[in-house]
Image: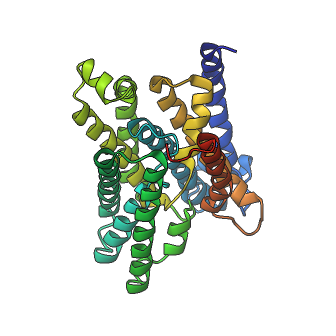
Amino acid sequence: MTSWRKSKILAMVLPLLLVGAICLSLFTGSSSLSLPELWQQLLAGQEDGVAYRIFLHVRLPRTLAATLAGAALAVSGAIIQSVLNNSLASPNIIGVNSGAGFCALLAASLAPAATALVPVAAFAGALATSMLIYLVASKTGASRITLVLAGVAVSGILSAGMDTLSILFPDDVIGATGFMVGSFSGVTLSALQPAGWLILIGIILAVAFSYDLNVLALGEDIAAGLGMRVSLYRFLFIVIASLLAGAAVSFAGLLGFVGLMVPHICRRFTGGDNRKVIPCSAVLGAVFALVCDSIGKLAFAPFELPVGILLSFLGGPFFLFLLLKKGRGRIYD
């Protein structure tokens, strides 16, 4: 099957998958939600109705959170992989998520009343970590595996910083355990608003500049020969990737491996053209996060498995598979 035919099929299937995943997320959970009852209460405006309150204050925010976080992390991963020319890179593996998480917890600790500051702090942390990893890659000529190991080291330092904050400011970082694992439970519409706008802006920018990302992925020499201002565009894409990862982490916590797995799956169907990979990653990332969250709600009901744990169970073997596939006995190339 040709890449064009695969892309055409994907364009028809992905919207259906997204609608199905959204419906699954909205109507699954520890409490049963009757669709006729909900519809009746919505039409009547019965704000004190049980189904109405569950839908508006629990299911809807959680579904929106999973949709936004999945899309943001998947697109961020696709950008990072292209900019660093490293198929093993993703926001969580090279420490971008940890940078966002550390600064988000720091903002919550030092200014607990300024909730709008958390997404901004998460973006700043993600950007600082991204720039650090990029400098390591550009200045040292590090191999792909060395770059990943540097990211792991940075992530370990930042994780220790987050643990320190949770001990020093226990009252201000309530729920830090769920944040460290990654979860959509307890997300509110008010908490989603600033981060949601940042994610929408980041995805629009990523789609708009996807052709330039293709040029940049050809390599510095070729891109410069085609007239591209390589440093400027590379910085732009790092900012976009950091914006997406930081905004997602600010309300969903340290979700891992979405940005690693989803772009790889998309490229299997669309090829390497980022004009197709970026929108495909956005939709498939949302579907992936929604389905995993629904499984977490249902698998051990009435107990709930945080989505971050399930993603780690899936992403860990996937990362090892990529590592062995890329290695072929010479993993330091």
* Location of residue 63 with respect to 224 vertically, above or below: below
Q: How many marks?
A: 0
In this view, the residue in front, 102 or 90, is: 90
**Side of 274 where 139 appears, left or right:** left
**Side of 92 where 296 appears, left or right:** right
In this view, the residue in front, 137 or 234, is: 137
* Location of residue 87 with respect to 274 vertically, above or below: below
In this view, the residue in front, 317 or 29, is: 317
Residue 121 percent across, percent down from the top left: 30, 61
Residue 39 percent across, percent down from the top left: 66, 46
Q: Is residue 24 visible?
A: yes
Please name the residue shown 48% across and 23% down the image: 273
Q: Which quadrant does the N terminus fall into?
A: top right
Residue 120 percent across, percent down from the top left: 30, 57
**Side of 105 where 50 appears, left or right:** right
Please name the residue shown 55% across and 45% down the image: 260
* Location of residue 254 with respect to 127 vertically, above or below: below
